Amino acid sequence: MLEKTTRVNFLFDFYQSLLTPKQRNYMELYFLEDYSLGEISETFDVSRQAVYDNIRRTEMMLEEYEKKLLLYYKFSKRQKLLEMMSQSLEESDPFRSYIDELRELE
């Protein structure tokens, strides 16, 4: 469950600008602020089922965006490669500072 939540959070970070304001609000409250479905439904004066349906639909949309654009996949791959490069270099190696700079850009 934690792995799924982490993935959805990353996908949301990458693709939130493609969502409607309502979708962004629901996702932020549910995944980032840890609101319950009931709390969100009270905030927006809608049913819990409406909130649930909207969140599930939005999750599916995020997965579709990822399937087409692969931003999260590429990000993860870069992180792994940077980690492998970092581990293979000595502390005094000048390339290590370049790797650190690349990490800061992420």
Image: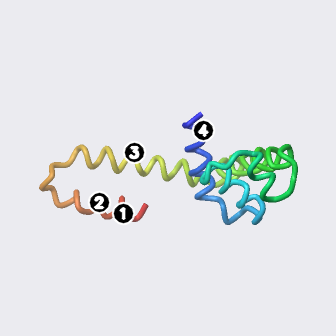
Name the N-terminal-most of marks 1 and 3.
Answer: 3
In the displayed structure image, the side of residue 28 where residue 40 appears, left or right: right
* Residue at 23% over, 44% down: 88
Q: CA distance from mark 4 to mark 3?
A: 19 Å
Kindly indicate whether the residue at mark 1 contacts the one at mark 2 (C-beta within 8 angstroms). yes
- Give the side of residue 94 with respect to residue 53, left or right: left
- Element class at badge 1: helix
- From the image, tell me which residue sits under label 3: 80
Residue 50: numbered disc: none
Residue type, numbered disc 1? Glu
Q: What is the basis of the colouring in this image?
A: rainbow
Q: CA distance from mark 3 to mark 2?
A: 13 Å
Residue visible at 69% across and 54% down in the picture:
27
Residue 29 lies, in percent from the top left, at: 67, 55
Q: Residue furthest top?
A: 1
Residue 48 placement: quadrant = top right
Of marks 4 and 3, which one's residue comes earlier in the chain?
Answer: 4
**Residues tagged 4 and 2 counted as in contact (Cβ below 8 A):** no
Callout 4 crowding tier (Cα within 10 Å): few <14, some 14–19, many ≥20: few
Q: Write down the residue under mark 2.
A: 100
Place of residue 13 in the rendered image (x, y in percent of width and height, measured from the top left): 58, 58
Q: Earlier in the sequence, mark 3 or mark 2?
A: 3
- Of callouts 4 and 2, the N-terminal one: 4
Looking at the image, which residue is at 80% across and 52% down? 41
Tag shown at residue 104: 1
**Which-is-in-front pick, marks 4 and 2?**
4
